Image (cartoon, rainbow, N blue to C red):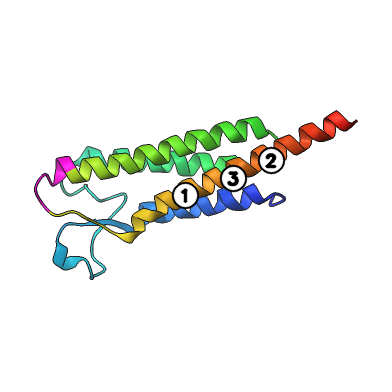
Amino acid sequence: MIQRIQTVFLLLAVIALSLFLWMPLINTDPALFNRPMGFRGWEVVHRYNGWMYLINLILTGTALGLSLVNIFLFKWRDLQMLLCWFCLILIGSAVLFVYYEYKIFVYPGGYVIFTPWNALAGGAALLQILALIYIRKDENTIKSMDRLR
């Protein structure tokens, strides 16, 4: 199963997205920034508005699930590349949703401090891009070998 480097990148993206859902994403008080308090990704707005944390959970969870399924699709490289693009779109949507919903709608004038754990979504997106590059490189290698025969 781990015969190509893109499998490692996809597995690391799954781990990063799992941590993105589990680790605290925001703090609501500047005095609490140095303390390990905050709201996790799946419960971040559960205390304020019930539907917003579900959207974050659905977007990030779908990207996590597609990345996990994508590991086992190493024989179908075209489908793997398509799923990598879908995961990138879902991760970008989740990041934009987290930022705009929490910054504008939940705390319109209050303090929202994003924790360093938010960088996990960017890391997962970077790992998806690396997996996409290596899947494309693998596809080009297979095509060049077919041409030589």
Instruction: Estimate how packed mark 3 is, as few (under 14), some (14 to 19) or many (20 or more) residues with alpha carbons within 10 Å.
Output: many
Callout 3: helix, strand or loop?
helix
Q: Nearer the viewer, residue 6 or 61?
A: 6
Q: Residue furthest bottom?
A: 35
What amino acid is labelled 1 in the image? Ala
Quarter of the rendering containing residue 52: top left
In 3D space, how far apart are the residues under numbered discs 3 and 2 (Cα atoms)? 10 Å
Image coordinates of residue 75 in percent, x first then y, are 71, 36
Quarter of the rendering containing residue 93: top left
Q: Which residue is mark 1?
A: 124
Q: Residue furthest left?
A: 109
Question: What residue sits 52% from the left and 49% below the top?
Answer: 127
Question: What residue sits 68% from the left and 33% below the top?
Answer: 76
Image coordinates of residue 112 in percent, x first then y, are 18, 53
Q: Using residue 135 as the reference point, say whether residue 28 is left or right of it.
A: left
Residue 131 got which mark? 3
2 or 1: mark nearer the eye: 2
What amino acid is labelled 2 in the image? Lys
What amino acid is labelled 3 in the image? Ala
Question: Sequence-wise, which precedes: disc 2 or disc 1?
Answer: 1
Q: Nearer the viewer, residue 58 or 131?
A: 131
Residue 137 got which mark? 2
Which range of residues does the magenta coloring cover?
104-110
Q: Give above or below for 39 relative to 45.
A: below
Image coordinates of residue 144 in percent, x first then y, are 80, 34
Question: Sequence-wise, which precedes: disc 3 or disc 1?
Answer: 1
